[in-house]
């Protein structure tokens, strides 16, 4: 039988052990300051505070932070690389400004729910205008290793700080589905920060649903941008994406590493501002909501007006980078070009002999102000899209044509006239392009 002394000793020993365990449990619950470094798989519990340290040469702690459910834990994110100042523009997209019609609580264009285009810088129901959501221009600058996206909007809004998300989608295989979304919450100052900045990836290619850009609603079988690559500096690379104000808050600028989108050499991209839904997993929004649920910014659609579930949203058309668009890419911006030319007399000329009926407009060959031009869309033969007559100057022109493939057909307009050049000419018109197609004619009684 144990003595009273032994019982007393065992009692105190048990108490000491329990006290030691209690101290350890308290320390784990209280947490501590841990460094989240590149490559760490740790996550910060929702509501946890964290601080950023920019310019550190080495992480202060190479060990992953202790996972804890305590929402008051503080984590230090050590940044090794920040964006630099840049100037110039690689590409830009302009967007309709709705500000001039804000008092009327309506948009006058730019919104087409069926094709995933939005001009909705208003609150739901009351249609209160939100100038910081009203995009007017979005610029992209690639300066390796960074990609910069600058957002210009109708005006800043104090309530938008930390709330309005500015972002860009990147469609790297040009099929109308965004593979990457980079966006960030409106920042409070001109200092680069990772607070509120997120990079998302669609790993299973379901952004846009069965038919990209076109509404498939109601369709909720996808999960949109489903993988978070970084959020507020938390991820495999804390330096992946940043945001700041520029020009005293008149603009917002994102910067992210080109590697975030796989250093894609070609892509379609577009800008957006979202102070409403802000849910990457519901892209594209016109698949998640029906138009009746979404509402409309147009009073001329009384059964849909005003905005409802889809509000405080503006996006741009899609701009090509690194390739020449065909004009058939989903969501492509409306680019235009011109086709023009001259009808000429492919006149006899003894010297040099190459100028005899060669189908080429040579010097001093006169114009032929007769006949007509029929323009068709697509591959030759095609006609019926537009027509043009040959003026007294012997010229014709089709300005403001959407980019794409065309077929130009020339009718000489005379029984004795024959053409010295092809009468059907295929043309591919690129953005801001000007294609010149001339047609030569001659007649049987011309001197030889």
Image (cartoon, rainbow, N blue to C red):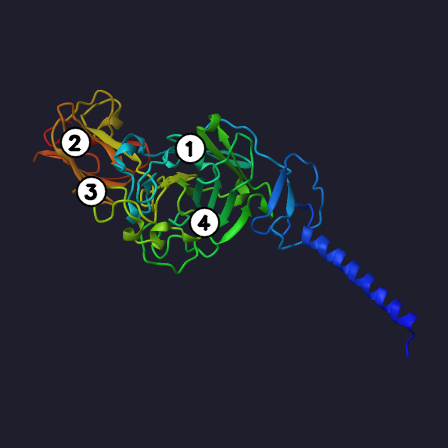
Q: x, y (%) of residue 363?
A: 24, 21
Q: Mark 2–mark 3 contact, CB under 8 Å?
A: no
Q: What is the secondary structure assignment of the residue under circle 3?
A: loop
Where residue 339 appears, as percent x and y from the top left, is 25, 32
Which label's residue is closer to the chain start, 2 or 1?
1
Q: Earlier in the sequence, mark 4 or mark 1?
A: 1
Q: Residues within 10 Å of mark 3 (few under 14, many from 20)?
A: few
Q: Gap in Å between the C-alphas at discs 3 and 1?
A: 28 Å
Residue 198 or 316: which is nearer the viewer? 198
Number of residues whose C-alpha sits closer than 10 Å to that of mark 1, classed few (under 14), some (14–19) or many (20 or more):
some
- Residue 270 visible here: no
**Residue at the top extreme, as displayed:** 364
Q: Which residue is mark 2?
A: 441
Identify the residue position indicated by label 3 in the image. Answer: 300
Foreground label between 2 and 4: 4
Residue at 86 percent across and 69 percent down: it is 10
Where disc 1 sits, the SS reads: loop
Q: CA distance from mark 2 to mark 1?
A: 65 Å
Disc 2 to disc 4, C-alpha distance: 52 Å
Residue toward you, 206 or 247: 247
Q: Is residue 223 visible?
A: yes
First reached walking from the N terminus: tag 3 or tag 4 = 4
Return the mark for residue 157.
Answer: 1
Residue at x-position 56% and y-position 42%: 240
The N terminus appears in which quarter of the rendering? bottom right
Q: Residues within 10 Å of mark 2 (few under 14, many from 20)?
A: many
Report the disc number at residue 348. none
**Mark 2 / mark 4, whichever is N-terminal:** 4
Q: Secondary structure at mark 2?
A: strand
Name the residue rendered at 60%, 43% in the picture: 238
Residue under pointer 4: 179
Gap in angstroms between the C-alphas marked 3 and 4: 35 Å
């Amino acid at each position: 039988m144990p003595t009273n002394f032994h019982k007393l000793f065992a009692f105190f020993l048990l108490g000491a052990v329990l006290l030691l365990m209690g101290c350890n449990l308290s320390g784990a619950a209280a947490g501590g300051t841990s460094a989240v470094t590149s490559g760490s798989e740790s996550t910060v519990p929702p509501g946890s505070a964290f601080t950023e340290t920019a310019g550190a040469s080495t992480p202060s702690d190479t060990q992953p932070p202790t996972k804890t459910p305590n929402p008051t834990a503080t984590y230090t994110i050590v940044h090794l690389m920040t964006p630099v100042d840049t100037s110039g523009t690689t590409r830009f997209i302009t967007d309709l400004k709705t500000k001039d019609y804000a008092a009327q609580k309506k948009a006058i264009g730019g919104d087409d729910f069926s094709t995933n285009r939005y001009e909705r810088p208003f609150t739901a129901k009351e249609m209160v205008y939100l100038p910081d959501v009203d995009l007017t221009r979005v610029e992209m600058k690639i300066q390796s290793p960074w990609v910069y996206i600058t957002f210009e909007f109708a005006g800043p809004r104090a309530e938008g700080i930390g709330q309005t998300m500015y972002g860009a989608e990147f469609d790297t295989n040009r099929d109308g589905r965004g593979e990457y979304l980079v966006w960030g919450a409106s920042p409070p100052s001109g200092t680069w920060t990772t607070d509120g900045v997120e990079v998302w990836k669609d790993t299973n290619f379901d952004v846009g649903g069965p038919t990209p850009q076109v509404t498939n609603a109601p369709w909720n079988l996808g999960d949109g941008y489903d993988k978070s690559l970084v959020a507020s500096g938390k991820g495999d690379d804390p330096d992946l994406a940043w945001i700041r104000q520029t020009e005293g808050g008149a603009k917002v600028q994102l910067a992210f590493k080109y590697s975030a989108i796989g250093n894609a050499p070609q892509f379609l991209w577009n800008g957006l501002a979202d102070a409403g839904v802000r849910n990457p997993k519901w892209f594209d929004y016109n698949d998640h909501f029906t138009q009746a649920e979404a509402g409309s910014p147009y009073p001329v659609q009384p059964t849909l007006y005003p905005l409802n579930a889809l509000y405080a949203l503006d996006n741009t058309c899609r701009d090509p980078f690194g390739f020449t668009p065909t004009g058939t890419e989903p969501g492509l911006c409306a680019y235009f070009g011109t086709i023009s030319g001259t009808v000429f007399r492919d006149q006899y000329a003894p010297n040099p002999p190459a100028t005899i009926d060669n189908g080429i407009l040579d010097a001093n060959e006169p114009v032929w102000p007769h006949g007509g031009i029929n323009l068709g869309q697509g591959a030759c033969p095609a006609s019926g899209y537009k027509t043009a007559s040959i003026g007294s100057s012997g010229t014709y022109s089709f300005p403001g044509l959407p980019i794409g493939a065309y077929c130009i057909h020339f009718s000489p307009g005379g029984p004795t006239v024959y053409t010295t050049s092809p009468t059907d000419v295929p043309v591919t018109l690129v953005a801001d392009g000007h294609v010149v197609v001339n047609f030569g004619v001659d007649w049987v009684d011309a001197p030889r």
